[in-house]
Image (cartoon, rainbow, N blue to C red):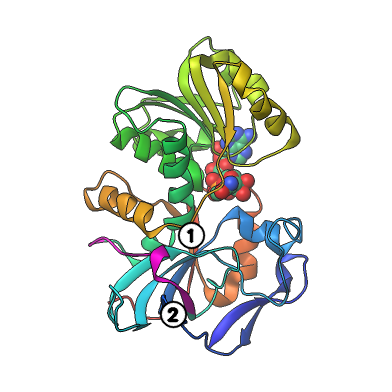
Amino acid sequence: MKAILLSKFGEPEQLRIEEVALPKAGRGQVLIRIHAAGLNPVDYKIRNGSMRLMYKTRLPMIPGFDVAGTIEQAGKRSGFSPGDRVFAAIPSKGGGYAEFVATAEKYVCRIPEGLSMAGAAAVPLAALTAYQALRKTNSLKPGKQLLINGASGGVGSFAVQIAKAMGAVVTGVCSTPKLDLVRQLGADHVFDYTAGDFSRTGERFDTVFDAVAKSSFGRCRRILKKDGRFISTVPNHGLFWHMALNVFRSKKAGVILFRPSGTDLGAIAGMIGTGAVRPVIEQSFPLEQAAEAHRRLETEKVSGKLVLLTGAPDH
Ligand SMILES: NC(=O)c1ccc[n+]([C@@H]2O[C@H](COP(=O)([O-])OP(=O)(O)OC[C@H]3O[C@@H](n4cnc5c(N)ncnc54)[C@H](OP(=O)(O)O)[C@@H]3O)[C@@H](O)[C@H]2O)c1
């Protein structure tokens, strides 16, 4: 099969299309024919080597954690059959930038009706991160007041929609050109971070979700209500320090580390099925243009998501 192989850490040019062996599905796994693969910032952080310790990355590897496609092969007792349209976030070994991947059935979920393969590939990791962060902060409840920083990005765009679907009052923070997008996603209020500091408005929130990890608990503490929660997507020493002090404070700091889960993806699929949540795709690229897609990804300016297409037809 064709796959994008990373053989050396470095610039996007290190992503090269190669012919590699077809993966084999083991016990409890399914083989997926990939139609589309979603990109996430962690992909370029792995590519440039900055995550090599955390992910214990072994080269050569096939990057990519988000896939959408059809079941090619499933075991006798599997809940899936060949031809089923599925999507999944796969664990840290990656393998998504390819024509096929074998992964554990427990990570896989059926694609809701009406969602394209590209749309489905844009969902798993970012939407799971948003959903799990909101659950962890007890924010999946009506009437909660939430501020989402980075509301126009992959994680943020899902966080706005999931929070709204749950009945929250949402303020989305983004730059001027993205204000309309964030309003369209359902945010009740938008804040332009190029025009001021959202932590100085005097408003108070139950949860501040720093989806893009550009702020800090230190800055956001003052806009949290009593018992309010701050959660970020990227851990650092400062955040760990504040987390260690959580037991002494009513306002808590936290971090989300997403976990692949077919069950949680099912909950998100339900929201997509009702029309409450939709993926935003800035651009799709053919698989062989993975390097170009990475160049865009690492600008940190993407609206929603980027997707790679393998060329397999979407029935
Ligand atoms: N821990 C985990 O499990 C986990 C999971 C997923 C992601 N992450 C991490 O979370 C971060 C965000 O991921 P993502 O997929 O949402 O990234 P992304 O889609 O690449 O984020 C791009 C968005 O960030 C916005 N942005 C850039 N600088 C900003 C700033 N200073 N303030 C507010 N918004 C800003 C941009 O909007 P503007 O053009 O308006 O600036 C753009 O729309 C990444 O660092 C990623 O590695 C962690």
Res. 169 image quadrant: top left
Q: Where is residue 123 in the image (x, y as percent from the top left)?
A: 42, 56
* Amino acid at the residue labelled 2: Arg
Q: Choose the circle earlier in sequence order: 2 or 1.
A: 2
Asked if the stretch drawn in magenta spans residue 72, the answer is: no
* Amino acid at the residue labelled 1: Gln
Does residue 208 appear in this view?
yes
| Ligand 1 neighbours mark 1 (CB distance < 8 Å) | no
Does residue 196 appear in this view?
no
Q: Which residue is drawn at 46% across and 82% down?
A: 25
Residue of label 1: 283
* Residue 269 relative to residue 236: left or right: left
Q: Which residue is drawn at 35% across and 78% down?
A: 71
267 over 112 or under it: above or below:
above
Q: Residue at x 72, y 63 (%)?
A: 56
* Viewer-nearest residue: 296 or 156: 156
Give the magenta-colored segment's residue range: 101-114
Residue of label 2: 27
* Residue 70 relative to residue 19: left or right: left
* Viewer-nearest residue: 39 or 89: 89
How many residues crowd mark 1 within 10 Å: few (<14), some (14–19), many (20+)?
Answer: some
Q: What element carries label 2?
A: loop
Q: In which quarter of the image is ligand 1?
A: top right
Res. 255 image quadrant: top right
Q: Is mark 1 on a helix, strand or loop?
A: strand
Number of numbered labels in the structure image:
2
Q: How far apart are marks 2 and 1 (CA)?
A: 36 Å
Q: Residue at x 68, y 31 (%)?
A: 239
12 over 194 or under it: above or below:
below
Q: Position of residue 254 (x, y in %)?
A: 58, 32
How many residues crowd mark 2 within 10 Å: few (<14), some (14–19), many (20+)?
Answer: few
Asked if the stretch drawn in magenta spans residue 110, the answer is: yes
